[in-house]
Image (cartoon, helix red, strand yellow):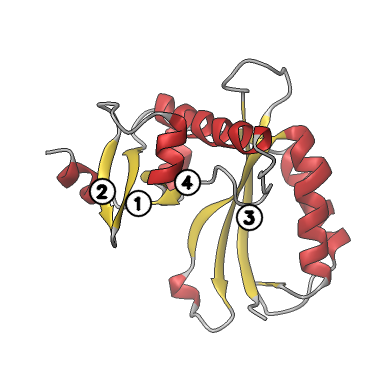
Amino acid sequence: MSITILHGMQVFTADDPEGKSSQPVIVVMTKITDQEQPLSDARWTFLFIGPLPEFHQRFIHRMSREFDQGHYLDRFGHAIRGSDFVRHLNTAIEKSRKVSATTLRRFGISAVTWSREDAEALGITELTMVAQVPFFMDSRYGFEIKQDSDAQRLVLYAMSLKRIAREAGKCDPLYTGRPMLEQPARLRAASH
């Protein structure tokens, strides 16, 4: 069993990019490592991007169970009860602010990509603002986070992938739609 150390967590909100709901989209970012990794390896990444109802009905329940089963520990290596994690999340939502390019860059997220399969489902493989970068025997597609419109596009793509997966009956609240972190230099080199 792999154990994850939770070094930090931030919750942000975004408007529904598809304009279908007045409820916010929730963006949960975590700074994590595997138990065997040193703290210096910890990087901020996306844990969840999705609508508020999915956050409450599926994500919180799943994460609470993960904590209760000991899959996650706090930054000191101590077990956290699922109910304590849920309380922490609810407090973080009350204090949350809108996700922005500045915020993402401050947390070290300056470029993102999605798999070829996800990019093709979104229909973004030919867009000029999207760069194709090699990834082992395949490709990823993504963009740099420079402006708030890029942060909004990230949320739009994540939400669109969730909608596509839900329609196909394959939506995983934790993984579906989440982008992978990318190095901006790789995207710049690929677009030339």
| Residue located at (63% from left, 55% from top) | 9
Instruction: Please identify, in this view, whether the residue under mark 3 or under mark 1 is nearer the observer.
Output: 1
116 left or right, relative to 18 = left
Q: Quadrant of the C terminus?
A: top left
SS type, badge 4: loop
Do tag 3 and tag 1 residues touch (Cβ < 8 Å)?
no
| Residue located at (43% from left, 44% from top) | 117
Question: Within 10 angstroms of label 4, few (less than 14), some, or many (20 or more) residues?
Answer: many
SS type, badge 3: strand
Question: Within 10 angstroms of label 3, few (less than 14), some, or many (20 or more) residues?
Answer: some
Do tag 1 and tag 2 residues touch (Cβ < 8 Å)?
yes
- List the residue tagged with mark 2: 133
Q: Identity of the amino acid at label 4?
A: Pro
Q: Identity of the amino acid at label 3?
A: Met
- List the residue tagged with mark 3: 9
Q: Is residue 74 above or below residue 132?
A: below
Q: Earlier in the sequence, mark 1 or mark 2?
A: 2
Q: Is residue 39 above or below residue 48?
A: below
Q: Nearer the viewer, residue 64 or 43?
A: 64
Q: Identity of the amino acid at label 2?
A: Val
Q: Nearer the viewer, residue 140 or 64?
A: 140
| Labelled disc at residue 179 | 4
